Image: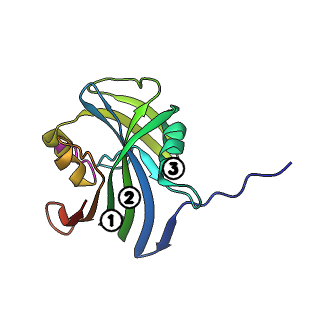
Amino acid sequence: MTSAPERHMIRLDRKPQLFSMRVAALILQNDHLLVQRGTKDNYWALPGGRAEIGESSEETIIREIGEELERDCSVERLLWSAENFFAYDGYAAHELAFYYLISLAAPFPFHENDIVHRIVDGTEVEFRWLPAQPSVLLKNDLRPRFIAERIGVLPQRHEHLIVCEGRSPAAEILKETV
């Protein structure tokens, strides 16, 4: 019997520097956006996770949604790729990220105000729906911030962003290309 090849996340930890490749999903339902956070975090992010060596970003988001939400999904389109620069837990972080609009094959539990799902993925992670409105997403500290600012009009074609957060009160988009 052949064993499965060893899996390696794309993450280089050279404290105080950190590089990673993350893939995330925009999942919309009832005019709400599904978000996640570690139970010890005070900010929200989109569901997803780190890419692994040898898998495409599309394969990553399909795998992550299957692992975290126990749902099959289909990729509608790539909305953004971003080079994110931010401070995190003593690191100067550099993240290459891909944000996909996806559809779930089966509905996901929905509640307007409560946590709808929890998993343990190294740490405990909780999921909830937030109204897909810039003011609500900003108030709830959705990161990266540019998603909240652009949720009202999703791009029809892929956009590439270079984003610096944490160096000023607001996110600064340094460069945008289509």
Disc 1 or 2, which lies upstream in sequence?
1
Instruction: State the residue position of label 2.
Output: 97
Q: Amino acid at mark 2?
A: Ala
Find out whether the residues at labels 1 and 2 contact each other: C-beta distance under 8 Å.
yes
Q: Position of residue 77 (x, y in %)?
A: 37, 44
User: Which region of the structure is painted magenta?
Assistant: 139-143
Task: Tell me the kind of residue under disc 3.
Answer: Thr
Q: What secondary structure is found at the residue carrying circle 3? A: helix
Is-magenta flag for residue 141?
yes
Q: Is residue 25 visible?
A: yes
Q: Is residue 165 visible?
A: no
How crowded is the residue under tag 2: few (<14 C-alpha within 10 Å), some, or many (20+)?
Answer: many
Identify the element where label 2 is drawn.
strand
Please tell me the numbered disc located at residue 83. Answer: 1
**Residue under label 3:** 60
Q: Earlier in the sequence, mark 3 or mark 2?
A: 3
C-alpha gap between disc 1 and disc 2: 6 Å
Query: Which x, y percent locates residue 128?
Result: 34, 33
Quadrant holding the C terminus: bottom left
Seen from the viewer's position, the closer of residues 81 and 70 is 81
**Amino acid beneath label 1:** Glu
Residue 157: which disc? none
- Assign the magenta stretch its main secondary structure: loop
- The answer to if 43 sits in the magenta stretch is no
In which image quadrant can residue 163 be found? Answer: bottom left
Query: On the rendered structure, is 18 left or right of 44?
Result: right
